[in-house]
Image (spheres, rainbow, N blue to C red):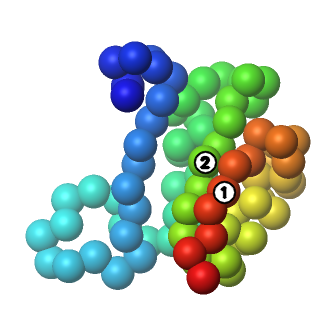
Amino acid sequence: MQRQYPRFRFWPTLTQPEPGWQLRSGRVQSHLTEAIDATCDTRNGLDIYLCGLKPMVDNVRLILKGMGFDRKQIRYEKYD
């Protein structure tokens, strides 16, 4: 997808990874600023897609709204 959409980023993050996991770990919330800054220098035209358990999704949505994102820019799917 990144070839087709140059601004697309997929950052899998595991809260409790198995030994040997090489990618991001910990809470998604701790990576938000890095992910947004790496994607673009403006929040206009940037959409955020979240999926996970309700507490995480709700918390990230609250943080993003506090960062100036409109609710329409935040798409999500809850697994519980």
**Could you tell me the amino acid type at mark 1?**
Tyr
Q: 75 left or right of 33?
A: right
Q: Is residue 38 above or below residue 26?
A: above
The C terminus sits in image quarter: bottom right
Label disc, if present, on residue 49 of the rendered structure = 2
**Could you tell me the amino acid type at mark 2?**
Tyr
**Percent position of residue 35, x then y:** 53, 43
Front residue of 71 and 43: 71
Residue drawn at x 12%, y 70% is 20
Q: Is residue 52 above or below residue 41?
A: below
Using the rendered image of the protein, determine whether residue 68 is visible from the camera's viewpoint.
Answer: no
What's the CA distance linking mark 1 and mark 2?
5 Å
Few, some or many residues within 10 Å of mark 2 (<14, 14–19, 20+): few
How many marks the image carries: the answer is 2
Q: Secondary structure at mark 2?
A: strand
Q: Residue 52 is drawn in which quadrant? A: bottom right
Q: Is residue 4 above or below residue 50?
A: above
Q: Secondary structure at mark 1?
A: strand
Residue drawn at x 28%, y 76% is 17
**Percent position of residue 41, x then y:** 66, 23
**Percent position of residue 38, x then y:** 51, 32
Front residue of 32 and 74: 74
**Percent position of residue 8, x then y:** 48, 29
Residue drawn at x 40%, y 17% is 4
Label disc, if present, on residue 23 of the rendered structure = none
Few, some or many residues within 10 Å of mark 1 (<14, 14–19, 20+): some
The N terminus sits in image quarter: top left
Label disc, if present, on residue 76 of the rendered structure = 1
Front residue of 19 and 79: 79
Whether tag 1 and tag 2 are in contact, CB under 8 A, the answer is yes
